[in-house]
Amino acid sequence: MADIFERLIKNYGPLGEHRIKAHGYYTFPKLEGEIGNRMLFRGKEVIVWSLNNYLGLANHPDIRKADADASAEFGLAYPMGARMMSGNSNHHEQLEKELAEFEMKEDAILLNYGYQGIMSAIDALCGRHDVVVYDAESHACIIDGLRLHAGHRYVYRHNDVEDFEKQLQRATALIEKQNRGGILVITEGVFGMAGDQGKLKEICALKDKYEFRLLVDDAHGFGTLGKTGAGAGEEQGCQDEIDLYFSTFAKSMASIGAFIAGPRAIIEFIRYNIRSQIFAKSLPMPYVVGNLKRLEMLRSMPELKERLWKNASHLQNGLKERGFDIGQTDSVVTPVYMKGGVPEASAMVTDLRENYSIFCSIVVYPVIPKGHIIYRLIPTAAHTDEDITTTLNAFSETKEKLDAGIYNVEDVVHMAEAR
């Protein structure tokens, strides 16, 4: 019999193998100071493009006051226990009510976290005879939720409506053959890596032809898309056809928690059957009260979304004008696609951080295929024109170095902090 620990330390995985040289710099970096467009990294000010603080609410004085007042009044422990047993409050129910109204749904349920919340929701919704049809580039939380599903699942090529219908036909045939079960389709409002919106309108149009229910993960669309900020469904004019709308507070709201909105009867079923909430402590009151304030500002201050899109357009248009490939993004998420390996990427990101004071996230193998690099830039309402111009100039110069082979190194640059 093998020692399970011995097996683990022989192979730390494709990311873990770089830990000795990467920890604290490329992986697990520590940004310090006030949350905003510029922060401190290893004691030096950098322009930050890696925070999902879309509307700039994280450090807004009204938000800081609401969070502080709620913490002073309730502390972090209240309410104590799971919501079903002893952890419910009028504030929790008020936030659910306002979220449902904002998303134009009958009801909503709060979730402690987005990742475990949607995993547990999939587990609650789907029985062993049900079939799930999902987009190939769905977020890891959806994939992990599907691992809990005992029934069949069919994946369709990313945003390929023709292949989606083909998989829908396969799912329908299986349901008819076994004479039990139903179909749940899962996709995203905005795909967080590439920034392209899911084909929600086209998927909804197929409801006239096939019988299925639609769950949309709109973590990056909530607060950034649609006339009111209600998300990708509102943006595409099909919010009514989305059966279950999910989002997290971690992006536009710059907070903790998540929610699912939909028909009252189904939300009530989820409320009484979602294991991650039934067997977990209730969302602490400071988060709930703080999220009520964030939702109020999101709804009443459209200038925040306007400023976000002004900055996103400036950044994206500037990158395209300089010849960069930003793919098919039609959201504020801004990927920059380049060619190179992990060592080259580490050399380039080091140059950007050390010599240009630009901090952005880099995506390499195994998240994407070998030989490719993605810089994932997240513009926010807090960024300035100066931030964007400085960043565009830095990208132009480092891209020239990448193309000239200056970043060709044999291994990941050793930048780890001493531990």
Image (spheres, rainbow, N blue to C red):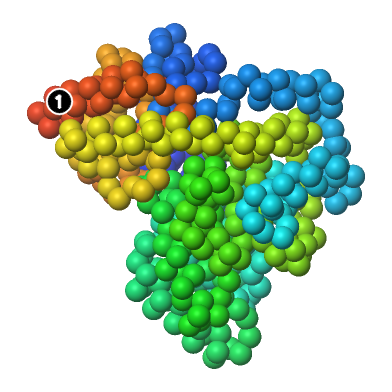
The percent coordinates of residue 126 (x first, y second) are 64, 69
Q: Is residue 175 above or below residue 194?
A: below
Q: Is residue 331 above or below residue 60?
A: below
Residue at horizontal 77%, vertical 58%? 271
- On the image, numbered disc 1 is attached to which residue? 401
Q: Considering the numbered disc 1 on the image, is that residue within a helix, a strand or a loop?
A: helix
Residue at horizontal 13%, vertical 27%? 400
Viewer-side residue, 230 vs 186: 230
Q: How many marks?
A: 1
What's under tag 1, amino acid-wise?
A: Lys
> Left or right: where does residue 265 sit relative to residue 329?
right
Residue at horizontal 90%, vertical 45%? 86
The percent coordinates of residue 320 (x first, y second) are 22, 38
Q: Is residue 341 visible?
A: no
Residue at horizontal 69%, vertical 33%? 293
Q: Is residue 262 above or below residue 78?
A: below
Viewer-side residue, 93 vs 309: 309
Farthest residue, direction left: 404
> Left or right: where does residue 208 sit relative to residue 358?
right
The percent coordinates of residue 276 (x first, y second) are 72, 51
The percent coordinates of residue 357 (x first, y second) are 33, 16
Indicate the quadrant where residue 322 lies: top left
Farthest residue, direction top: 43
Farthest residue, direction right: 86
> Left or right: where does residue 373 sit relative to residue 53?
left
Indicate the quadrant where residue 384 lies: top left
Q: Is residue 91 visible?
A: yes
> Left or right: where does residue 192 sit relative to residue 293?
left
Say few, some or many: other residues with alpha carbon within 10 Å of mark 1 (under 14 / 14 to 19 / 20 or more): some
